[in-house]
Amino acid sequence: MLIAHDYRSLFQYEQYRHEQHQASDPLNSLLEAFGLRMKRLLSYPPEEITDLHPHYLTSSVDRLFVREPIYLDILKTLPKRMKGSPPQVVARLPWSKQPFVVAAEVEYGRVVAIADYAPFTDEYISYGNNQQLALNIFRWLSSQHHIDCFDARMQSVVFQEQTADFSIVLHNPQPQRLEHIHCLLESDKGVEILESQKVIRSIAPYGKIQLHWAVKPSQLGNQILRLTVDFPENLNVESLFFDKAARFQCLPDAEIDLVIRNSQGENIHEVETGQTFEVQAVFRKTATMDADSLRLQLKTASSHLLVESTEDTSACRWRLNALSEGNSAVTLVVKETDQQVSLPIRVHSSTKEQIASLEKNVMGPIAAELQYRTAQIHPGFDSQEMQQIPCHIHSPENFISLLKAPSESEQLLEALQVAREERNENRPLVLYLLQNIAPTFSPIHGCCIPYDPKLATHLSSQHAQYKDNLAQNFLTLEDKDRTWIEQSLAALILHEKYGHGFFFTQTTLGRQLSILYKHGMTRNADPLQLKAPYPRAIYQEYKQAIAALWDSAVIVNEGFATWVELAVLPSCSGVISEAAYRRKDFLFNQDSSLSAFSRNSEYFQHFTPLSLSGSRYQEGCEYFQLIQGYFEEDCGARCAVHALIKAADIDMGVSENNGQVQFALNSKTMTDLLLSTSDHSARADMRIRLIHGILRDFYNKIRLEQKKLMFNEIVSRCEHPVDVLVNRHLGW
């Protein structure tokens, strides 16, 4: 069996499953029987593959050209029938080293999985060795070959004039004895190979044999071994050629180096506070010095590091703990010779510590001031419900785990890992992260602000056009000062907690949407993530109405949150007040999400947004700003808040009883009220437009009434003109 997919076909397959609410995954269910899964490649796609391992499939194959690869994931726990013969990785992607071609034998069957079908297409088959790979695959799958070759082993580093072992397994896949096999191992740089040619008299039917060569390099640098498997006495049997049977690096045997490794054994250059890491001495022996007999000691005079073990002459490894932020160094001392080797180490505070410091030293004082400022506008901002809304900064990983469904979390977490290692321009990956990781208000978890300046800076270096977006979504960049962070935190707390928080806790429509959110009934929820039969059945029945209800609130909800932010920031103390212009420019001019959102919204196809810029923040915010301006300065902001309460005073009969969502209206009635009827009473965005229109038309009357009232004495009097005009002309 041959299984091939590329990025586009796998994406279409996954999209079809999502649209059909198909819980099963036939493709990967099939592959899991052979210990494999196929996954979309999130890193920048390569154009060619040269990392090939000796196998019949790669005979005479040095380079493959690909178009839109994915990658193969080998399961950690293999099926029982695979335990004796695990899948063989035949080719790997560059950079990430993820499997690209895998061959597996299961009982009497054979499987090849390839992570891009482009090599088989008319367009690509003539490129590189694509055609040879295709021929090899079909010959191997149909057992039209005489010998298998796999499991080549060679250490990646060999010291100069030291001997290493190269081995490979030959297998006879036929029921007849295979005779007179000649194997020749050669080097590209004059490596001394003991008995380079080996002759095998025969391999029994279905038998295996492992061959070994002693390899001794004399030249420094990267080395390649070539292998030929030949049948000189049987011209009908094809030979196998592997121009890169093994690769290794030959290092000089005369120096001591120190390297830092993390818990995965990877070389790193910086460490975080609280992190345990390893310093390893790489010792290259000389003819006059025996490293095994030396006494080695690792020392540090810095308080930033703690060396757990001071001597380990057998392994030349030391475990260290990073205690505090700062520049430090460790020194290796060879006591017998007094030689010293130093390694600088930079310790920076962990993301967890940075977040804790920001919440304590920066967010706390800002939040206290904002609570005071907003309470002066409207008493609802100082209500117990508003005070209980939590506001926290999260690492991207915690943000995803907290807010995203399990079906989304796995790929988002993988995208984060890929993004941290990506070295090429990868616009789809950046857009994917920006769309899914951004400051958010959750009716369950409150105001959630992602924080990762290192990741944002790394991505902005390759994607300058998204620098502002990355700085806003991840709170800051590494080159931004504390002022920027203070301004951004103040703006985001106002927007998420006091803007969206007020909408979801203080308005009729917001409280109903909050109930839907808590039960997983968002506009694009996956029914398969809801419990069956209830609430999955009720969600599927009301899905169209629920999506329309959420969409009808976008302009009012986002517009009000933006208005709160821009109305309060200028009154804040110090440099925080200066953030208003920057935030307005970003929200109005650098956001165009409403345009894309509208294309996928049935509600907005009926009721088109009026914002020309495509910003989901601008139209609603401008209505609240205009309404505020129709009243005297002392009560204008309060009346704008009252206009929101009137606009969102929509009771669709959504309630919660004994932990379950209940709908007072049937799904058809609810859908008709939102999408079909000419009455706008159930549409929040249309209501704010109408409220604004009434107040604008009666502007002169409002001004006259204001002269007769003492707005600063009694709060209810400030709201009087809104109530009177809306009730009289709109009946609300």
Image (cartoon, helix red, strand yellow):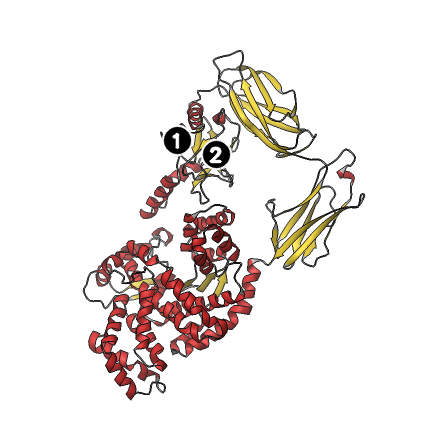
Q: CA distance from mark 1 to mark 2?
A: 13 Å
Q: Give the class, few, some or many, for how many residues have Cα within 10 Å of label 2's Cα (few <14, many ≥20).
A: some
Nearer-N-terminus badge (1/2): 2
Residue depicted at 56% across the width and 61% down the height: 354
**Toward which corner of the image does residue 652 lie, by quadrant?**
bottom left
Q: Which residue is mark 2?
A: 49
Q: Which SS class for mark 1?
A: loop
**Residue position marked by numbered label 1 in the rendering:** 124
Label pair 1/2, CB-CB below 8 angstroms: no
State the mark number for residue 710. Answer: none
In the image, residue 66 above or below residue 176:
below
Q: Nearer the viewer, residue 570 or 118?
A: 570
Q: Quadrant of the N terminus?
A: top left
Graded by Cα atoms within 10 Å as few (under 14), some (14 to 19) or many (20 or more), the crowding at tag 1 reads some
The amino acid sitting under disc 2 is Ile
Residue 210 place in picture, x, y as percent: 59, 24
Determine if residue 198 is in view: yes
Name the side, left or right, on which 57 lies relative to 716.
right
Q: Label 2: state its secondary structure.
A: strand
Q: Amino acid at mark 1?
A: Tyr
The image quadrant that residue 715 belongs to is bottom left
Q: Is residue 619 left or right of residue 407?
A: left
* Residue 652 visible to the viewer: no
